[in-house]
Amino acid sequence: MPRTIECSIIRNFKKIVFSIVIPYYKKRKYIERCIDSVLEQTFSDYEIILIDDGSQDDIEELINGKYAGKVTLITQNNQGVSVARNTGIANAKYDYIAFLDADDYWSPFYLEKNKNVLYREKDVAIVGAKYSIDVDLVEKYDVALKYTQLKKYFKKAICETIFFTSATIVRKSFFHDNEGFNTELSLGEDLDVWFRVIAVGGNVFFIKNTLVYYSNDDLLSITKSSVPFTKSLNSKLQEIYYPLFSKFNNVAFEEFVAKQIYSTLSIRYFTEDTHDVSKKMIRTNKKKYFFAELYFAIPYSIGSRYSAKTFWRKYTRKYFKFIFTYIYI
C-alpha cells in the first residue's frame, strides 16, 4: 500500500550520509549536467566519487577546476563500467551507496526523499525510485513523498524488475560479504546486484515520485552493438545463482530464477546460435513448471521458423507473464 508523508514530520536521529558513485567514460557532453544535479540537491550530506574509466579527455581538468573540493576523482585504465562501480564502492566512506550514470541526472529532491525513507523505515536493503526519459516529468518542485514497500519483490520481478541504476540506493554493508558488479557481464550486471541484494534479505522500498532523468543513449548503443548472449545475465543465471541458493536460503528467489530461465530463454531457445545453451539450461532447471515445459515441447522446426516474428515474441511474452502471474504464483 502506498505511503504518503510530508518531509517536515519525519523525526529520527539516524545519521544518513550517501556515497554517490558515478562511473565515467567519454560522457563529456553530459557530465556537468549530471554533477550539477547532485550539487543542487536539497539534502547535502554526501560525497561524490567519480571514476574515470580511461576516457582520455579533459575530465581531470574539469574536476580539478570547476568541481575542485566537491568531487573525488579516481582514474583507472579502461576496464568497463562494472570495474568502475566496484572501484567507487571500495572507496566509499558512508553507509548508503547511490549510483548515478554520467549521462543521467537527478531531481533536486532525490536524496532528500531517499533520506526520508531511510529515516522512517527499518532494515532497508535497497530503495528505488521512478525515472523517466521525459525531462518534463522529472520533479522540479517539492511534493509529498509517496513510496511503497515491495514485500514480495520476486513475485513482481518476473514481469517487471523495477529497479534502474541511476535511481537505486543500496546499503554499503551488502558489499562487505558479497561480490559487487560482475565484471564478466556486459548486459544485466546491474540487475544481478539488485537481485542478490534483495535475496540476502532486508526491506525493499520504491519511491513513486519521478526523481530521475534517464538518458537512453546507452540502451540504443547496446542494442546496436548487439552484446553477445554469453555476456548477458540471462546466459549465466544458473552459473551465478545456483551456488548462492544455500547461502541465501530464499525460496522466493529460487523460484524467481527458475521462472526467469524459462521466460528469458523462450525466444533464445528457437534461435540457432543460442539453441544448444538454452536447451541445456532448460533441461537442468532446478524447478519445473508444466505449462512452461509445454512451450518448449514445440518442435524446433516450427519455433525457429516463427520466433523472429513480432507476433510470436509478443504472445510468447504474454504467455509466460500469464502462467507466472496467475498459475504459478
Image (cartoon, rainbow, N blue to C red):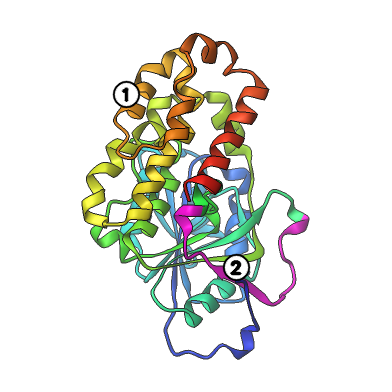
Identify which residue is drawn at 42% across, 78% down.
122
Tell me the tag on residue 110.
Answer: 2
Identify which residue is drawn at 39% across, 59% down.
198
Left/right of residue 277 with respect to residue 63 in the rendered view: left
Identify which residue is drawn at 40% across, 52% down.
195
* Most foreground residue, 173 or 123: 123
Q: Is residue 280 above or below residue 136?
A: above
Question: Can I make out residue 78 in this image?
Answer: no
Question: Can I make out residue 142 in this image?
Answer: yes
Structural distance between the alpha carbons of marks 2 and 1: 44 Å
Label 2 crowding class (10 Å Cα cut-off): few <14, some 14-19, many 20+? Answer: many
Task: From the top left corner, tell me how far across and down residue 152 is, in percent.
Answer: 47, 61
Range of the magenta residues? 136-155
Q: Is residue 42 above or below residue 309?
A: below
Task: From the top left corner, tell me how far across and down residue 53 is, in percent.
Answer: 41, 42
Left/right of residue 210 with respect to residue 25 in the rendered view: right
Q: Tell whether position 63 is magenta.
A: no
For label 1, the residue is 280
What residue type is disc 1 on? Answer: Lys
